[in-house]
Image (cartoon, rainbow, N blue to C red):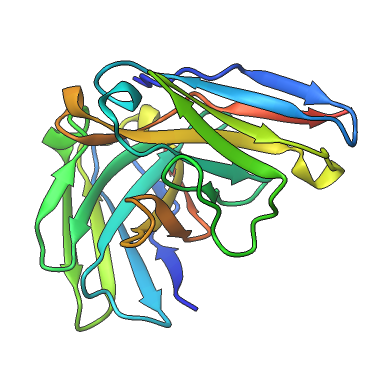
Amino acid sequence: QVQLQESGPGLVKPSETLSLTCSVSGGSMTNYFWSWIRQPPGKGLEWIGYIYYGGSTTYNPSLKSRIAMSVDTSKNQFSLELRSVTAADTAVYYCARVGATKGGAFDIWGHGTMFTVSS
Amino acid sequence: QSVLTQPPSVSGAPGQSVTISCTGSSTNIGAGYDVHWYQQLPGSAPKLLIYSTSNRPTGVPDRFSGSKSGTSASLAITGLQAEDEADYYCQSPDSSLSGSKVFGTGTRVTVL
């Protein structure tokens, strides 16, 4: 069974950069898109972007100027950087796989990691 | 930012049926894009419930079904059970947002 696990600091100061990593276990990253999704406390889901195993990316236009995604297939990991964070970026961040045989749905999710922006 | 609108809440007694609507537009559901549904139990990560409008992943009970018509999609839950109490989200790509994947506003299902 493919499993995903997010890791990163739980707290970052305003204007700093958030860096998160998602580790993929139990399967290969090849031929899949990998995504980040976030959920502010008590609110709904927001898609952040996705990266193909080969490195090409597509980002949410509302976040595009502040984010960068990367992938390291040798380590079975992909990462998210979110620059110039504010309190509005406080959320649970999930990594997810885009299902190749599931019409583009997010078929496997990590447990999520809470990220807080505070001075 | 969500362009997919869902009712904030629906409720039903055990054994009853409920339906959750997901209203979009000509740039997402109405454009023929696939619609997917996710279930988020309290304190847990979302889980894929329905993909490509009406398909269930392995392990999802057939009490859950999906459909689509025009610019809207629906998720139906029949034989409601206490364990179905959760938040449900629809999701689809949107061509007006450079192909971004958008989620619905979410619906809380309460089992009375």
- Say which quarter of the image contains residue B32: top left
Q: Is residue A59 above or below residue A106?
A: above
Residue at x 45% of width, y 75% of height: A2
Tell me if I can see residue A91 in this picture.
yes
Q: State the residue at coordinates (30%, 35%).
A: B33
Instruction: Say left or right for B86 vs A84.
Output: right
Displayed quadrant of residue B95: top left
- Residue A110 vs residue B8: left or right? left
The one nearer the camera, B67 or A100, is B67
Q: Which residue is located at x 43 percent, y 52 percent?
A: A94
Along the viewing direction, whichever of B48 and A115 lies nearer the viewer: B48
> Residue at 19% across / 83% down in the picture?
A74
Q: Position of residue B94 (x, y in %)?
A: 25, 29
Vertical order, A78 against B99 (above or below): below
In this view, the residue in front, B86 or A66, is B86
- Quadrant containing the C terminus of chain A is top left
Residue B62 vs residue A87, the one in the foreground: B62
In the rendered image, residue B14, in percent from the top left (x then y), is placed at 90, 35
Indicate left or right for A13 with B38 as reference: left
Measured from the top left, where is residue B53 in percent x and y? 45, 39
How many numbered discs, if any?
0
Q: Position of residue B22 (x, y in %)?
A: 49, 23
- Picture quarter containing residue B60? bottom right
Question: In this rendering, is residue A94 above or below A64?
Answer: below
| Residue A119 visible, this angle | no
